[in-house]
Amino acid sequence: MERLGQAARAAATAMRRTATGPKNAALLAMAERLTDARAELLAANARDLARGRESGLDAALLERLALDDGRIDAMIEGLAQVAALPDPVGEIDGLRSRPSGIQVGQMRVPLGVIGIIYESRPNVTLEAASLCLKSGNACILRGGSEARESNAAIAACIRTGLLDAGLPEGAVQVVATTDRAAVGRLIAMPEYVDVIIPRGGKSLIERISREARVPVIKHLDGVCHVYLDATADPEKALAIAVNAKTHRYGTCNTMETLLVDAPVAEALLPRLAEAYAGHGVELRGCERTRTILPEATPATEEDWQAEYLAPVLAIRVVDGIDAAVAHIERYGSHHTDAIVTEHYGLARRFMAEVDSSSVMVNASTRFADGFEYGLGAEIGISTDKLHARGPVGLEGLTTRKYIVLGDGQVRR
């Protein structure tokens, strides 16, 4: 870890002076290497999946671990999209003249060395590398042991792409060891690492937040809500509430609790229950929900704060937007929450009053994603308020420094 840190710090110095062209060339070279290595990637991933099944990984982790042609295509497309994005490094904002004659502004610059710790999803290896590279950072990536062969295959493509573009190998390093002690060392090297970004289960992120000696960008839970207001268009409400839950179960932007305004509960809940039954979703409801859907399991206090990551949904009937916002404030995780409504004023209130990193009107929570927001591949979702919030893309991996332009001025 000491050697990785030294190499990353040296690479970060080189990356600060790297122009946009070589960074884009490296990203496109990586895309070519991934295309050429598709068979090797799938074979490596198959071995990881087989080992995961043997060791008893649950369905949600296996789903995150799996690669197929579609996910590899998405990885390649993500590289091209990041290469096409404007380079934020070197942008100068707010340049203004002062009475002394100097001009003062802020320049966007890389954070430096970013340590990223993640579980299961091997596509994170490529997403993290692409965003760190384009934003002028060096990164040290530590994936989960369950994806070690997939990550190694992807790392080989990244390394070749860097060399093809003439960039230092140390700009992207994947920790080879599965020893958990490597994580403890990575998060305690402020002399080499400027920020840590954990992506994974709650226990991992809690550990990182508790033990890290460098700043952390994180979110702990994805307890996301959809509120169906009394004025909601029924077809929109049905489509959004079903998609937000069933599009994928193992993601942090999946809806875990559905809130339904009392005046439309009797009309909407039976239709929703039928749709959810078709997807095999277990329903857990409040007493008012169960008078309409007696087949629903009684919801407990723990259900309102649960991140299931599974085909399970909590449903509560509420009395208007005040009750919906109060529920989200008490039980939500400040990740992503949505309202379905045709009332402009209620939409504005929901956006202003719900304190989450993404707040949506008439759209599925599944859109809370860097790719969908046009950021390219994302490095994660942040529910922190400092330094970045929401999907973390290129700008979230940079900071600003003041610059002063003068013409010989001295302070009197």
Image (tube, rainbow, N blue to C red):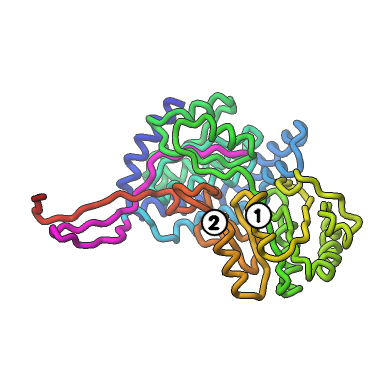
How many numbered marks does the figure carry? 2
**Residue 370: which numbered mark, if any?**
2
Label 2 residue SS:
loop
Q: Choose top left, top right, bottom left or bottom right for residue 45.
A: top right
- The front one of 260 and 196 is 260
Q: Main secondary structure of the magenta part?
A: strand
Q: Amino acid at mark 1?
A: Ile
Look at the image and say whether residue 209 sits in the magenta stretch: no
Observer-side mark, 2 or 1, equals 1
226 to 175, vertically: above or below: below
Label 1 residue SS:
helix
Which residue, given by chain and number where applicable, does mark 1 sit on? 328
Q: Residues within 10 Å of mark 2 (few under 14, many from 20)?
A: some
In three-dimensional space, the C-alpha distance between marks 2 and 1, rounded to whole angstroms, equals 23 Å
Residue drawn at x 11%, y 56% is 407
188 to 167, vertically: above or below: above
Q: Amino acid at mark 2?
A: Gly
List x then y, in percent, for residue 276. 82, 59
Say whether residue 305 is left or right of residue 380: right
List x then y, in percent, for residue 329. 63, 53
List x then y, in percent, for residue 286. 81, 54
**Residue 141: which numbered mark, if any?**
none
Residue drawn at x 42%, y 54% is 395
Is residue 152 shown to the viewer in this render? no
The range drawn in magenta is 91-119
Q: Residues within 10 Å of mark 1 (few under 14, many from 20)?
A: many
Residue drawn at x 68%, y 60% is 324
Residue drawn at x 44%, y 47% is 387
